[in-house]
Image (tube, rainbow, N blue to C red):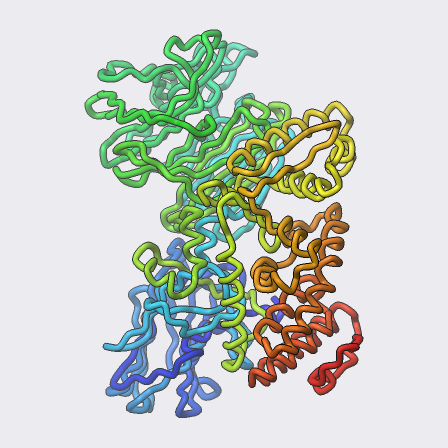
Amino acid sequence: MPIDKRTSYNVFSNKSVEFSQYFNIECNLSLYPDTPIGYIIRIKNEKSNTIYNLFYDGQGQTHTFSFNEEGKSNLFTAEIDMDELLNVHWFKMRISFDLKNDSIKLTIHDHTFGAGNANLPDKYSPVIIFGKSDHIIDVPSFGIKDLSVGNQEKYSFPLKESEGDIVHDSNGKALGEVSNPRWLINDSYHWTFLASFKSKTVAGANYNPEKKEIYYFNQDSVYIYNVRSGKTGMRAFSNKCPVQLALGTNFINTKNHRLYAYEVYNDRVPEEVTMASIDLTDFDNWETESTDELLSQLHHHGSYFDPSTSRYTIFGGFGNMHYNQNFYSFDFNSKEWQILGDFKGDVIFPRYFSSLGYLEKTNSIYIFGGMGNESGEQVVGRKYFYDLHEINLTTKQIIKRWEIPWNEDNVVPVRGMVILNDSCFYTLCYPEHFSDSYLRLYQFSLKDGSYKILGNSIPIHSDRITTNANLYYDKQLNSLYAIVQEFDDDIVSDLKVYSLAFPPITAEDLVSYQRSAEESAILIIIISCVVIITVTVLFFMRKSSRKVHNMKHRLNKNALETARPNSVYLFGDFTVLDRSGKDITYMFSVRLKQVFCLILQYSMEGGITSQRLSNLLWPDKPEDKVKNSRGVTINHLRKALSELDGIELVYNKGCFRIEQSEEFYCDYTRCMQIISANDTEGSKQELVKLLARGKFLKSSDQSLFDSFKTSVEHKLEPGLLLEMEKSFETEAYQTTINFAEIIFNMDPLNDQALAYQIKALQRLKMDEEARIKYQAFVVEYKKTMGNDYPHSFKDLSRINRNFIG
């Protein structure tokens, strides 16, 4: 990673602290395999030249932590066995300075190391920096959370921010700065795409929590993806899997470390192998387990494996025009499927697409949702179930825990349920009746079925019945994993792997982390957020730049406050809020965003023809397929827009257009109204708030929007430059700076904006910040243009209306 991309976190950049007798630096630490060597922390004393650092080396057989007096000597070294921390996602790190007894101790995951005779002062004013610091540029990949510094007087840092570079303590005070960090709270909302694989023959997939590996196998070979290291391997089997894979169903027995591939039914050759297993250690040789089969195929049956009894049980499924309601268990002694009977209590209606989980505490199976009907006959028609049944395996009692009303789009769950305790369970749900839809993570209460949606969405293409998805939880890595297997023809499939940090959060939770320090103080008791120190930052900003950061913080806050119900924002991050003010951006896939923006663009001219829309978005598809894709996309867009009032997608005289009323707000539309009315002077503050969100269509890099972006920026820039000049002349210097930042969003090399911003900063007695802005501009200019910027800082300090770069 380039040096200027490495992170630095100054804990007390905005405050000088002093401790006597002793002080501790404590945090939870997480190590990542990307860069296993470098400096984690430096501790300076403001009143002396002594500097201590902690160097980490994870390249050998141990985790080695060296605590040094910088430039002088190693004070002590801590070595931790590699296996001890291998599956520990977070562990405690503590550095203790005993000023009274003149000693330093380091605690790593319950191991303590230290040194005496450290020649410590009676009082210590620490400057604490994680990551890159001054000339120390070697930074390992690590994360921190739950940071505290002090003695009886303790400073605690929840590290709950989700954006920005200002770090607040638990009281909401801005005490530190981190340069372009990666805030881990975002990983609890945004699913992270990890890897994808493709198989030309029928394949199955599973996750092994013991080895942290995802397996994607067909009859000939297996892909092995390690979620911890990110490494992928591929092994060809020495003998072909004897099971003729049709659905790729499988399970893992972690007791004997074997993967079992099975098909409950085959319609080809009698006595054909229906279950086989392979050792997960070497993937060398498939062994036949059984030729027993059921009477019909069971698509989308639920299942669970109980390692304590070595029994694999399935429930439900669809095949031969029937929905199933039976439990079948595979007996590894007789090598046969056995129907489980003798259940009493409530009846579970026949169904498929159910989610099934097992809770050891109650020795019970839980079955949620699905599709089917009371008779089990497909010809009767199907209904969606939103109920939960508990099957106690000790008493053989079936209890219907609840059935909830469902007023949203019909959805089905994936077959895997994550159930950690007797309070709730997690599963992924999606509307399988759409070709292109999305998976959402739901948390349901076991008590009453109340639920909430967590995280953003995962796309899924579900044209074929063989398409499936599953959800897994890894307690040691503190993560959820989703695997999505999509089939185009029931043979060829793609597998995609995603992760989400646990515990997951809602969209409302994420927004709450983006509030100002004053607002966020009341949220401390809700959740603890983490900040990762990774190799991702430009450079460590000096103390004197904090005023610029605070100005940006205020500007972004003002932009955020413009958000309102029934609104769409195109400046900055594409955002949609429904009639109740809820963020429903997740409903707009990349394709829906494209269609919406294109129709909105052409609506100013009366609309866009269906042919023009097709040519822009599906240029290489034949007409018959384009018509179907366009129709599906338009229907999805209409459905998404139905969540808002005052906006309608209209098709008239061969053209699509967006019609808006006063109930609806679009920042682009309002911006064009201001420009068309030549009212930039009267709407100056509104325009600043509106444009402060960021660049127009910021996240849309597709070339088809280039002309749209250029047109908007050409309309805006002259007026913005004029207002920037006027604000400077009226001594509204903060407004001048704000306008300059907005202009830079459109034209990063606009030296007229640079000149006015520098002069405005100087008028505010912020000379150092002005020089920093100039240096950043010079670097960007050199990188873009390939030659040095021709104007000196002194030149730009003298404002000239006719200044031409």
Q: Residue at x 53, y 33 (%)?
A: 642
In this view, the residue in front, 109 or 235, is 109
Answer above or below: position of 502 versus 239.
below
State how many labels appear.
0
Residue 37: x percent and y percent?
51, 68
On screen, 4 above or below 427?
A: below
Residue at screen point 58% across, 58% down: 690
Q: Residue at x 32, y 89 (%)?
A: 120
Residue 224 can be seen, yes or no: no
Residue 156 sits above or below residue 276 on the image? below
Quarter occupied by the N terminus: bottom right
Hey, which quadrant is residue 44 in on the image? bottom left
Q: Is residue 459 above or below residue 405?
A: below
User: Residue at 34% across / 18% down in the picture?
Assistant: 327
Q: How far from the left and from the top, in percent, is residue 153? A: 26, 77
Q: Quadrant of the C terminus?
A: bottom right
The foreground one among 709 and 563 is 563
Occupied quadrant, residue 423: top left
Left or right, 567 with reference to 782: left
Residue 536, image x and y in percent? Answer: 56, 65
